[in-house]
Amino acid sequence: MKISKLAEGPDHTWYVLGRDPDKSDSVIDTNEYVICGKEEAFLLDPGGTEIFPQVVSTVSRIVPVERIRHFLCSHQDPDIFSSLPLWMGLCPQAKIYLSWIWSGFVAHYGHEYVDQFVKVQDAGMRVVMERKEFQLIPAHYLHSSGNFHLFDAELKILFTGDVGAALLPDGHDALYVKDFEAHIPLMEGFHRRWMPSNQARDHWLARVRQLDIRYLCPQHGCILEGDQVGKFLDWFGTLELGGALV
């Protein structure tokens, strides 16, 4: 997997992992994000069981795995955290932040670890790693009915799960968007099918437009940076969602 340093502050650093050339074609491509502090690390949407060996070996090149004390499970899909029991075998003291609505479902991945679940209520919450604070922002129905994004105000990074996701063609190995207009066709079908609610989208947009965002980081596809963030928010705001009705 590729490793790219996304941004660095005095006390913590973000990395993105992705584009594994050895990944099976039958498994959807995902990005994993690691936030490293001085003594602890935070792993966002660690991925499914099928890619666990690649992810853990790549993460270990950045930080000792035993320092991972926090996981975000943004929603319930298997590509988000079906690897839960494997990770918890290595990081048994880590906390897992997830929507309360999905706690009983995610427990099917590893019910013996439910005591480590932090059940996030619908309004979101603040999460502290060492002395660094992050905000879990509601993104319900985009696409999951219980869904959270994570915002780092200091480094101006918004992890957005499936919002901003793109389905990349074979051979596309870039981690960052180079040409926003050319990237739209890679995002459009995904968002029209997987995002069911214009009302939920508008509610999310009203909230995130108040944030100072430099990087918009989806779980699939490429990272949007700088003025691309505003272009994406404007484009997403005009898209007609939930178009799979027949």
Image (cartoon, rainbow, N blue to C red):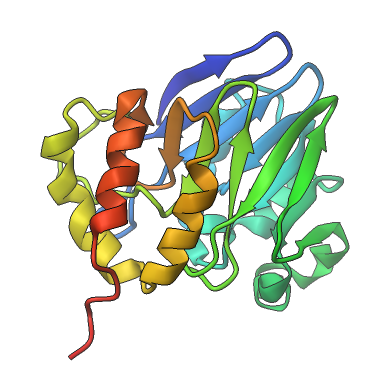
x, y (%) of residue 106?
66, 70
Tell whether 46 sits left or right of 186: right
Which residue is pictured at 81% across the width and 45% down the height?
94
- Residue furthest top as drawn: 10
Disc tally is 0
Which residue is pictured at 43% across the width and 46% down the height?
219
Tell whether 172 sits left or right of 126: left
Which residue is pictured at 46% across the width and 67% down the height?
200
Along the viewing direction, whichever of 39 and 27 lies nearer the viewer: 39
Quarter of the image containing the C terminus?
bottom left
In this orientation, does residue 142 appear? no
Based on the displayed image, in which of its 4 quarters is residue 117 positioned? bottom right
Which residue is pictured at 64% across the width and 22% down the height?
154
Along the viewing direction, whichever of 188 and 211 lies nearer the viewer: 211
x, y (%) of residue 124?
71, 56
Along the viewing direction, whichever of 164 and 44 lies nearer the viewer: 164
Tell whether 221 sits left or right of 213: left
x, y (%) of residue 5?
49, 17
- Residue furthest bottom as drawn: 246
x, y (%) of residue 201?
42, 61
* Above or below: residue 79 compared with residue 54: below
Quarter of the image containing the N terminus?
top left
In this orientation, does residue 145 appear? yes
Based on the displayed image, in which of its 4 quarters is residue 19 positioned? top left
* Above or below: residue 23 compared with residue 78: above
